[in-house]
Every structure is written in C-alpha cells, then in structure tokens.
Amino acid sequence: MSRFMIVLGILYIIGAIYGFQAFRTLVRNPYLQIAYGLAFLGILVNLYFQFNYFDRSQGLTPGMGLAIGLFLAFAALGLSSGFFMLVEDIVRVVRWVIGKFAVSNDVAHSDFPSRRRFISQIALGVAAVPFVSLLYGMFKGKYDYQVLKYTLEFDDLPEAFDGYRLTQISDIHSGSLDNKEKIEYVVDLINKQESDVVLFTGDIVNNIASELHPWKETFGKLNAKDGTFSVLGNHDYGDYAEWSSEEAKAANLDELKQIQKEMGFELLLNENRFLEKDGQRIALIGVENWGEGGFKKAGDLEKAIKDVKASDFKILMSHDPSHWEHQVLDHPYHYHLTLSGHTHGMQFGVEIPGLVKWSPAQYRYKYWAGIYETAGQYINVNRGLGFIGYPGRVGIWPEVSVIELRKKPKRAV
C-alpha cells in the first residue's frame, strides 16, 4: 500500500472519530451509534480490499470507482464535522486552563453541555452539504448532460463553411459507465444537434479495449453528414493496466482501433483529413496524446500536418490541453481552433456563468474547461462525457460542446 493511501486512511480515521463525537452528542440511540461507526469502518475496509485484491490486468473498475466515491463522501462527512469538534475540544481545553486561574470554575464548565450540542448541530449540518453533494454526484450528477453552444468568428474562414457546426465530445471512459438508458439518451441528444461533423477527443476507455464492447452498438449510432472523427487519449494506450507482455498490450491497442473503426469513428493518428464544401476546404488534424509532465507524448504535430498548408483553415484535435500551451500556440502555423478534453474539470467545482468558475483543476491546468483565446487561436477544453476515479460529478457536469464557425463580417470602409 502506498504512503499516500496510508496517510489518507489515517486522516479518514481521525475525521471519523472526531465526527462521531458530534453524532453521539445528538443521537443517543446506541444502535444508531454503532451503525454509524460500522458504516465508516465498512467503507474503509472495502476501499482497502478493492485496491489490494483486484485484477491489475483490468485497471480501474466500476467497483473500485464506487469504493472511491463512498470513501470520499464519508471522508468529507467525518473531516468536516470532525473539524468543528476538534476546534470545540481546543476551546474547551483553553477554557479549562483559564478556569484554573479563575476565581470560579464556572468559566470552564457552566455552559459546556448546551454549547457541545450546539456545536454538534453546526458540525453535522455543515458536513451534510459535501456528503449529500458527493452522493448526488454519484447517482444523478454524472448523467446530468449539458449542451454548451459557442459561436466563433474568424477572418479567414472559407465562405462555404460560414455557419458550419461541429459537435465535440470527449473522455467517454466506457469502463466506468453503468447506465445504458442514460448513454442512449446522450447519443440521441448529440445526434439532435444536427452538426456537420462529430469530433471525439480521446479517452474512450479507462484501460482496456474490452470495456468498449457493451457500448459499441450505442456509440456506433452517432452520425453526422461529414462523419465522426476521433483521436487517442492517455487512457487509451493501456498504460494504466498490467500486461503479460508488450505484445499483449499492443494487441489491446490494435483491438481498440478496430472497434472504433467498426463504430464508424475515423481515428486520426498523427494525420489529417480535409473537409470539403462547395470547392473549398478546411483541414482537420488529429494528433496522438501529448501531455505535459509524465503523460504519454506520442503526438507528432509535424507528421500530422503533412500536406496541410499554412494558409489552410485548421481544426486540431489534441486530447491534452497542455499540448496547446506548450507546442501549438508558438508553432509557425496558425491553428484556428484546437479541441481538447482530459481535465474533466476535475469532475468537481462551482460554475455560475458570469460570476464564478472554479475547480481544483485550475491549479494543475492553465486551460481546464471551456473556450480560451490567445493571439486569435482558440481552444475548447471539453469537460468530458464520462467519469473516472470518483464515479460522479458535482458542479462540473458532463458536456456536449456545439461550436458554430462564422465568417467575421468585413468592416465598412
């Protein structure tokens, strides 16, 4: 077991113990107290067994995701309520010390029972917010699909593509999906956008190609006039599962490519296609995953733009937005629009249009959700369709991006 998991477990236990004080103060029934304690213990034991006795050739499974989600929810309950009780204990100790030097011990003890109960009510009331939110995210929020529509204007967009619409989806993570009815709904929702092209920007599985088998027919229903195109994300290479040999790992990737082909996805592996309309064209470029830090760097932009001219209007599909920041923005070519995913917006945050946009993802990625523009070059970081790790979403909902390209009107002289 890693040191991180040990530290996490210790914090969980401390939070559970202190949080139990608040529960015990308000709930006097011993059976409910025992049930409360056993729930915390059971969640921790389940997580331990999920991570120490699972088939490492499968990587992260739905069962492990559920264990993580419940652990996070109960950890939030314990640590949030425990914080208040810890502060109360500290205050009580300080008051006791002061009382030692006071004329009367009333300073230390007169209001303790009523104050303890009041603090316990606040502690559990506050702790209920993240606890309920995390549970909601697991059972409802992860399928609360949002269609986000953008209109982007360009001076040099070919006239024939004025009004051209594309739908971007990303990060399906099919190994985490557990509700076929909801997935069929979102596929229908995507098709109802009636975009000219559908673009998928990577991470179609968590670890292995077989995760896609139950969803092959469903995602195969995606359709658009100019087709459905895709690229690979960091999870698609099988790097997070254990393999008997490099040959087995390579065969898994080959299978994944074949399944996408059978689904009707045209996978772009450091290559490009031209979308043509009324004798004009735009270049669609797809690179393999390139991520800053320890992420896979298989993306080869120079190879991908073979036969693409600097003057061509370019749409780049690249899974990790750090690629845009580190290689695309300063490239000699001008990439009009880059489409990425990868961050999921950390599946947790607060977004109120025009007021608040916050997620822990922003401390790891400069570009983590939505549309950004630099020097006339745009990127859309899709928040993802699926989920991984924590099996839910809170505040950062699953996204279908619809982007309309417009020719910028010429100014009157």
Image (cartoon, rainbow, N blue to C red):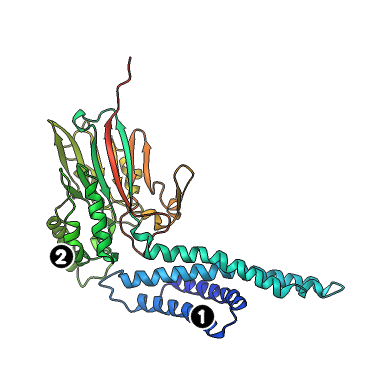
Where does residue 291 sit, x and y in percent of width and height? 32, 52
Amino acid identity at mark 2: Ala
Q: Secondary structure at mark 2?
A: helix
Where does residue 156 sit, x and y in percent of width and height? 25, 28
The answer to whether residue 117 is left or right of residue 380 is right
In the depicted view, which residue is nearer to us: 317 or 157?
Answer: 157
Which quarter of the rendering shows the N terminus? bottom left
Mark 1 is surrounded, within 10 Å at the Cα level, by few (under 14), some (14 to 19) or many (20 or more) other residues, namely some
Amino acid identity at mark 1: Gly
Q: Label 1, on which residue?
A: 37
Q: Residue at x 40, y 50 (%)?
A: 365
| Mark 1 and mark 2: Cα distance apart in space | 47 Å
Where does residue 215 sit, x and y in percent of width and height? 20, 62
Q: Label 2, on which residue?
A: 251
The quadrant where residue 329 appears: top left
In the depicted view, which residue is nearer to us: 397 or 248?
Answer: 397
Mark 2 is surrounded, within 10 Å at the Cα level, by few (under 14), some (14 to 19) or many (20 or more) other residues, namely few
**Image mark for residue 353:** none
For the residues carrying marks 1 and 2, which lies nearer the camera in this image?
A: 1
The answer to whether any part of residue 360 appears in the image is yes
Q: Residue furthest bottom?
A: 31
The vertical placement of 63 against 316, above or below, is below
In the depicted view, which residue is nearer to us: 141 or 369?
Answer: 141
In the depicted view, which residue is nearer to us: 378 or 222?
Answer: 222
Q: Residue furthest top?
A: 413
Q: Secondary structure at mark 1?
A: helix
Where does residue 355 sit, x and y in percent of width and height? 49, 44
Which quarter of the rendering shows the C terminus? top left
